[in-house]
Image (tube, rainbow, N blue to C red):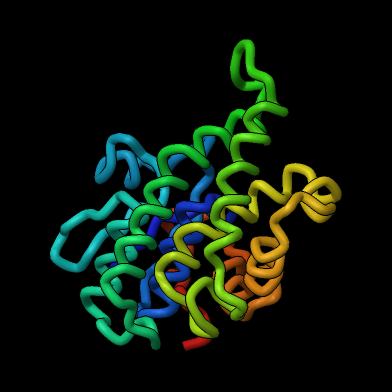
């Protein structure tokens, strides 16, 4: 059985858990503390960031997008909708934008005290500019492209969720992103999020095995 090292609130780990759930891949879930990482995690992934997926054959995947792609490859009907080429390219560009730029500004907005000479408001505004551009591209549907979840949804929404959590009252006001706000609210109310945010005790070597997803 594959083993997933995870941390509940980490957006990257959320991505991986959503992909595993949608692909109906059962794993042993090991919830870890990022302040006290277990030796078994350090041994298989020196950078020791989550998520880390240890496969049956000993292979290790320690990037969240690569875990998503592994799930898609092993369960080709994981998503109900097949995107056309333009949609696929657009989705990949948006995911890259969030991984490289949005997350950079999000960290300096949400965790401004961790950085020197950082203006949190300017980084908040940089995130908002990205969201305003993306807002114009969202279809009038539950998820980004349609009423069915797809890769862009599980890859991007965890970061928008974190952005909102930093100042919910500000985010929920009129920021010129009505479609983003609806998209995020659909995610926050979804069964998908409810499943992946289930509580697990911190993993210890002698604890009983905890399986994820728990409702398959």
> 118 left or right of 89?
right
In the image, 137 versus 17, the foreground residue is: 137
Position above or below: 145 against 123: below
**Residue at 64% across, 77% down:** 190
Quick check: 182 left or right of 83? Answer: right
Residue 157 sits in quarter: bottom right
Is residue 95 placed above or below 91 in the rendered structure? above
Residue 148 position in % (x across, y down): 49, 83
Q: Position of residue 200 (x, y in %)?
A: 58, 63
Could you tell whether 10 is left or right of 75 in the image? right
Q: Residue furthest left?
A: 57
Q: Who's the residue at 76% across and 50% down the image? A: 175
In this view, the residue farthest toward the top is: 117
Say which of 6 and 126 sits in front.
126
Q: Position of residue 47 (x, y in %)?
A: 32, 35
Residue 24 visible in the snapshot: no
């Amino acid at each position: 059985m594959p083993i997933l090292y995870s941390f509940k609130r980490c957006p990257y780990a959320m991505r991986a858990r959503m992909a595993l759930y949608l692909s109906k891949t059962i794993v042993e879930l090991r919830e870890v503390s990022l302040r006290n990482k277990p030796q078994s995690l350090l041994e298989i992934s020196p950078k020791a960031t989550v998520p880390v997926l240890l496969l049956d054959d000993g292979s290790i995947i320690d990037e969240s997008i690569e875990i998503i792609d592994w799930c898609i490859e092993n369960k080709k009907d994981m998503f109900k909708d097949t995107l056309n080429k333009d949609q696929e390219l657009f989705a990949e560009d948006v995911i890259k934008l969030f991984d490289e730029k949005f997350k950079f500004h999000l960290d300096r907005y949400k965790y401004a005290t961790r950085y020197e000479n950082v203006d949190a408001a300017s980084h908040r505004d940089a995130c908002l500019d990205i969201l305003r551009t993306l807002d114009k591209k969202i279809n009038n549907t539950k998820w980004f492209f349609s009423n069915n979840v797809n890769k862009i949804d599980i890859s991007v929404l965890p970061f928008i969720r974190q952005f909102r959590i930093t100042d919910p009252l500000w985010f929920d006001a009129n920021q010129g992103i009505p479609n983003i706000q609806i998209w995020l609210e659909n995610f926050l109310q979804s069964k998908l999020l409810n499943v992946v945010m289930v509580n697990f005790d911190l993993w210890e070597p002698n604890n009983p095995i905890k399986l994820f997803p728990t409702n398959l």
